Amino acid sequence: MTLPPGVPAATKKGSWAYSAQLSHLLFPSRARPDTGLWPYAKALNADGHPNYVDGYLSLGLSGHGMVPGRPDDYFGISYFNFDFSDDLENAATPAINFDDETGVETYCMLYLAPAVKAGLNFQWVDPGQGDEPDFWAVTFRFVVDMRATS
């Protein structure tokens, strides 16, 4: 693969990146004690060379087994932000107007039978290409787990 003009080869010495991930069980599920309501956070900070991001942040809340009578269903909501590398943004300009990418996502997955589940996912994204408009993405998932039927 050839790098675009202006993108330096990844030969920098002393490059660094660090990340952290935190989560904590706030409320255990009555139906399934190993699950419940969890806030979480993921963060990354880097020097942006040769990494394609200077930073990343994701914050969210997920729940599993929280609805009475529905121990296998799960849901969540999250926020994310990618801070693309300044080196990447500068190298792509003027062909692409890079910016940070931000979004919000919510999802749910319902168990319809022991081997069948269906879910919805909604995302709003402000894309990293600064000239592109914000958009909504909606997906529907239907899963049949053949391992559970045998």
Image: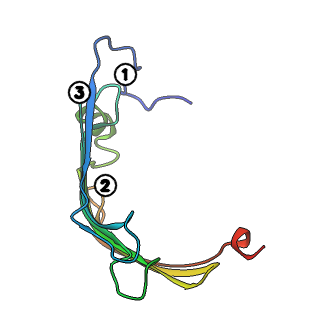
Nearest the viewer among 42 and 35 is 35
Give the residue drawn at x 33%, y 78%.
66
Judge the density around disc 3: few (<14), some (14-19), many (≥20) Cα neighbours within 10 Å: some
Image quadrant holding the N terminus, namely: top right
Give the residue drawn at x 25%, y 62%.
60
Give the residue drawn at x 34%, y 31%.
51
What amino acid does circle 3 point to? Answer: Asp
Judge the density around disc 1: few (<14), some (14-19), many (≥20) Cα neighbours within 10 Å: some
Up-down relation of residue 91 to residue 124 (above or below):
above
Secondary structure at badge 3 equals loop
Where does residue 84 sit, x and y in percent of width and height? Answer: 27, 42
Q: CA distance from mark 1 to mark 3?
A: 14 Å
Q: Nearer the viewer, mark 3 or mark 2?
A: 3
Sequence-wise, which precedes: disc 1 or disc 2?
Answer: 1
Q: Mark 3 — residue? A: 47
Up-down relation of residue 48 to residue 93 (above or below):
above
Sequence-wise, which precedes: disc 3 or disc 2?
Answer: 3
Up-down relation of residue 105 to residue 83 (above or below):
below
Give the residue drawn at x 33%, y 14%.
12
Q: Mark 2 — residue? A: 129
Colouring: rainbow
- Quadrant housing residue 120: bottom left
Question: In this rendering, would 87 be left or right of 109?
Answer: left
Q: Mark 1 — residue? A: 8
Q: Residue furthest top?
A: 13
Where does residue 50 sit, x and y in percent of width and height? Answer: 35, 25
What amino acid does circle 2 point to? Answer: Gln
Q: CA distance from mark 3 to mark 2?
A: 21 Å
Nearest the viewer among 98 and 50 is 50
